[in-house]
């Protein structure tokens, strides 16, 4: 497996972990309804990151396209999380934007 795959897989796994933590933490917020978009994107982002990592690990012929989609979803999630002051949202935003960048490199 090449170095680009390894770096992207690592970014995807870290992003998935951050999104799962953010998702769970958002569910504990006083105003969960206000966090609905964040929660929805956390779930979607965690799922696509897991799928992207798996596609790269198995050397899928569709890995680049999956990484392209992963980058778009990570960016959307990161931008949503940036809107919230919570520490878990800020950490998630950072992981998402880092993953989006790694996935874009992978897809190019």
Image (spheres, rainbow, N blue to C red):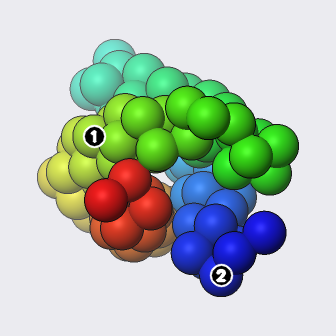
User: Is residue 40 positioned above or below 72 on the image?
Assistant: above
**Regarding mark 1 in the picture, which secondary structure is present there?**
helix
- Residue 38: name its quadrant: top left
x, y (%) of residue 97? 33, 64
- Placement of 67 over or under 44, stated as above or below: below
Closer to the eye: label 1 or 2: 2
- Nearer the N terminus, badge 1 or badge 2? 2
Q: Residue at x 43, y 68 (%)?
A: 102
Residue 68's spot in the image, x, y percent? 35, 42
Percent from the top left, x then y, of residue 91? 46, 70
For this rendering, which residue is in front, 34 or 66? 66
What numbered label is drawn on residue 8?
Answer: none
- In the rendered structure, the answer to whether residue 56 lies left or right of residue 65 reads right
Q: How crowded is mark 1: few (under 14 residues within 10 Å), some or many (20 or more)?
A: some
Viewport quadrant of the C terminus: bottom left
- Which sits in the foreground, 41 or 3? 3
Task: List the residue tagged with mark 2.
Answer: 3
Tag 1 near tag 2, CB within 8 Å: no
Residue 1: quadrant of the picture: bottom right
Q: Can residue 31 be seen in this view?
A: no
Element at label 2: helix
Residue placed under numbered mark 1 in the picture: 72
Would residue 52 be found to the left or right of residue 41 on screen? right
- Pointer 2: residues within 10 angstroms few (<14), some, or many (20+)? few
Q: Which residue lies furthest to the front in this view?
A: 61
Q: To which quarter of the image does residue 17 belong?
A: bottom right
Is 36 displayed left or right of 42 in the figure? Answer: left
Q: How far apart are marks 1 and 2 (CA)?
A: 22 Å
């Amino acid at each position: 497996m090449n170095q680009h795959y390894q770096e992207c897989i690592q970014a995807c796994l870290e992003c998935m972990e951050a999104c799962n933590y953010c998702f769970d933490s958002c569910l504990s917020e006083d105003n969960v309804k206000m966090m609905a978009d964040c929660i929805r994107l956390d779930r979607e982002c965690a799922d696509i990151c897991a799928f992207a990592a798996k596609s790269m690990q198995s050397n899928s012929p569709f890995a680049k396209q999956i990484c392209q989609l992963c980058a778009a979803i990570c960016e959307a999630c990161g931008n949503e999380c940036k809107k919230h002051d919570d520490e878990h949202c800020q950490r998630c935003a950072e992981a998402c934007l880092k993953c989006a960048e790694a996935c874009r490199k992978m897809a190019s």
